[in-house]
Image (tube, rainbow, N blue to C red):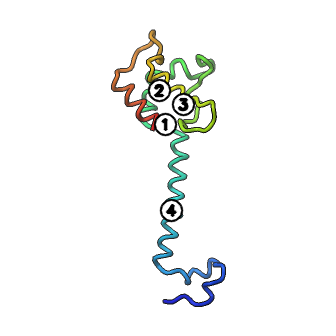
Amino acid sequence: MIPGPQCLRPMRLRDARCLTPAATLAVCSLIAAAASAGETAADRRRSPPAAVASFLERHCFDCHAGEHPEGGLDLTDLKFDPDAPGGDRPWTRVIERVAAGEMPPPDAAQPEAKEAASFRAAADR
């Protein structure tokens, strides 16, 4: 079907007949991709990956959760967004401290090297 002159003016929803099936599919695909990409980014900010969550549960929440978290850092209230813009990036500091072996502190149970590496890889994606 060759589009007529009515397809040259700005489109309205009722003018969808002016789109070819391929164009319609392309537009729908772009909308779906944009919607799913937005959801994925939002999900990452809300909850950390499984390797990060289990590491935090085993090695961090005893001290960094609750009413009086050590250092004023409550990891349960911190949105998981290691790529957050700005100078104050709590997740970047957490990842760096684990990588440097500073956290968990020496008097706490230490993670195995493989577990710490999994945490860093999942958190620093």
Q: Foreground mark, 4 or 2? A: 4
* Label 3 or label 2, whichever comes before in sequence order: 2
Image quarter for residue 55? top left
Q: Residue at x 46, y 22 (%)?
A: 98
* Label 3 or label 4, whichever comes before in sequence order: 4
- 3D distance between C-alphas at marks 3 and 2: 12 Å
Identify the mark at residue 48; answer none if there is no mark: 1
Disc 4: which residue: 32
* Label 4 or label 2, whichever comes before in sequence order: 4
The quadrant the C terminus occupies is top left
Q: Position of residue 62 (x, y in %)?
A: 51, 19
Disc 3: which residue: 91
Q: Position of residue 114 (x, y in %)?
A: 33, 26
> In this picture, is 59 found above or below 118?
above
Q: Residue at x 56, y 23 (%)?
A: 65
Query: Which residue reaches farthest top?
Result: 107
Q: Nearer the viewer, residue 79 or 3?
A: 3
- Local packing at callout 1 (Cα closer than 10 Å; few below 14, some 14-19, many 20+) is some
Image quarter for residue 119? top left
- Local packing at callout 2 (Cα closer than 10 Å; few below 14, some 14-19, many 20+) is some
